[in-house]
Image: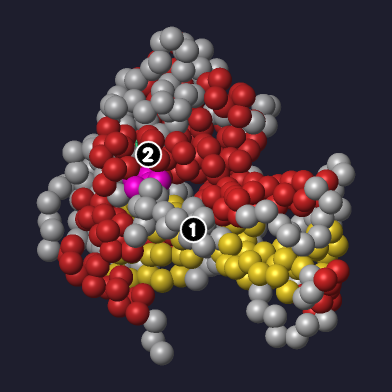
Amino acid sequence: MRSPIPDYLASALSSVEADHSGATADYIPELRDADPDRLAVAVCTEDGQMYSQGDCEVEFSIQSISKPLVYALALADRGFDEVLGKVGVEPSGDAFNEMSFDTEFGRPLNPMINAGAIATHSLVGRHDATAEQQVERIVDGLSAFAGRRLEVDESVFESEISTSFRNRALANMLRANGTIHDDPLIAVAGYTRQCSLLVTVEDLARMAATLSNRGVNPVTGAPVVPAAVVRQTLSVMATCGMYDGAGDWMTRVGVPAKSGVAGGMIGALPGQAGIATFSPRLDKHGNSVRGAELFQRFTSEMGMHLMDVAPPGLAAVRGRRIVGEGDEAITIVSLQGNLAFAGAERFLRNLVEEPLTTKRVGIGIVRVGSIADVGRRMILEAIRRLTLDGHDVYLIDADGLLPDPDPGHGGRVTIVNAPGDILRINGLDL
Ligand code: DON
């Protein structure tokens, strides 16, 4: 069979192809002169499968899409306290290049606007790192996100730096307020290099997929940043990634995203996939017009809005029955699906609302897909309480799905591979 996904992506591209609205970024000469008709899309799943269509080979500069990735590197290198002390996490409601500064806390409002991104650039690497070493760390880090070595486009760099009057003003404002300590011009040069890194739409999809995959590049398997850093980064992308269009984006599209003025855009769907688009004409916020249309299409057609979640708890208890008689009798409660808070709560409620009538209780997790940490803790606490109530508890966990099954103080559980181990009864459908 041929996968329908590339066909779907190709038809999505054709549906937006005719839209020539918007314009290339005119404040950077190299970007103004780019071919405005380029169009590409790539989707990389959280296990590394890539689907792409259109101008996938074309390289363009990453621009502001570097901002969340460099923010992640700064958090990983310097820790949350230092980074949050210098750069906030509040949406500015302003354009990306606004002279925006939170005077109450003495820091830029967030790392997605240029003021915050220049400050974030100077927070990467060790405290004693030189400006060159910070750029090197960023090139290495972004290459790890992409899964291949990235290079700076020197002509884009020269073109932007020669006209970067506004960013210089921002860096001077940061220096005057003590947010950065470097020479403001050197900070702008480093930040502009970061923005001039060349990527393809597939690179961007792998970068986004690394964010979707808790910080591990799904293609190379390399851990790039810790999971806690990814959570912070995706949250800031969701609230501030699309600048003064962030609220509109989050409600209509609902995917944490970031755009760049060369026409790239990424969206990261946690636990599912990284998506990237490329089309250079921009709207008034500096976001790709056709990229935004494509994302909106994916959301409505593929159910990608973050707030559209299938109810995970409803069918967590697959069944409950008593098997065997007398002292041999055992109540088997079989669970299924993905057990996070809602699913585990259904399990607890089942035990509370329907009191057990047998001394022996078996909890079957053979058909469970995954157990979140909160689900694990709730199951173990149920086991502890059942033991204290006088029950003998068995956990039927053939695949070792529930790690470290210690129910804690007063609790006891026997792990069995299959129901037959307890019952010697064949054909029991868990
Ligand atoms: O600093 C700048 O203005 C550019 N290097 C990056 C701006 C950007 O990509 C805004 N996003 N859409």
Using the image, tell me which numbered label, if any, was put on residue 346.
none
Horizontal and vertical percent position of residue 380: 75, 50
Horizontal and vertical percent position of residue 331: 72, 66
Q: Look at label 2 and name its amino acid.
A: Gly
Tell me the residue that label 1 is attached to: 314
**221 to 5, vertically: above or below:** above
Left or right: where 165 falls relative to 269:
left
Residue 78 position in % (x across, y down): 64, 31
Q: CB at mark 1 closer than 8 A to ligand 1?
A: no
Q: Tell me the quarter of the image containing the N terminus.
A: bottom left
Pick whichever of labels 1 and 2 is earlier in the sequence. 2
On screen, residue 72 above or below 326: above
Q: Is residue 367 left or right of residue 291?
A: right
Asked if the magenta segment contains residue 255, the reply would be: yes
In the rendered image, the quadrant that contains the C terminus is bottom right
Labelled pair 1, 2 in contact (Cβ < 8 Å): no
Image coloring type? secondary structure
Question: Can I make out residue 60 in this image?
Answer: no
Instruction: Measure the C-alpha gap from mark 1 to mark 2.
Output: 33 Å
Q: Quadrant of residue 76?
A: top right
Residue 273 left/right relative to 318: left
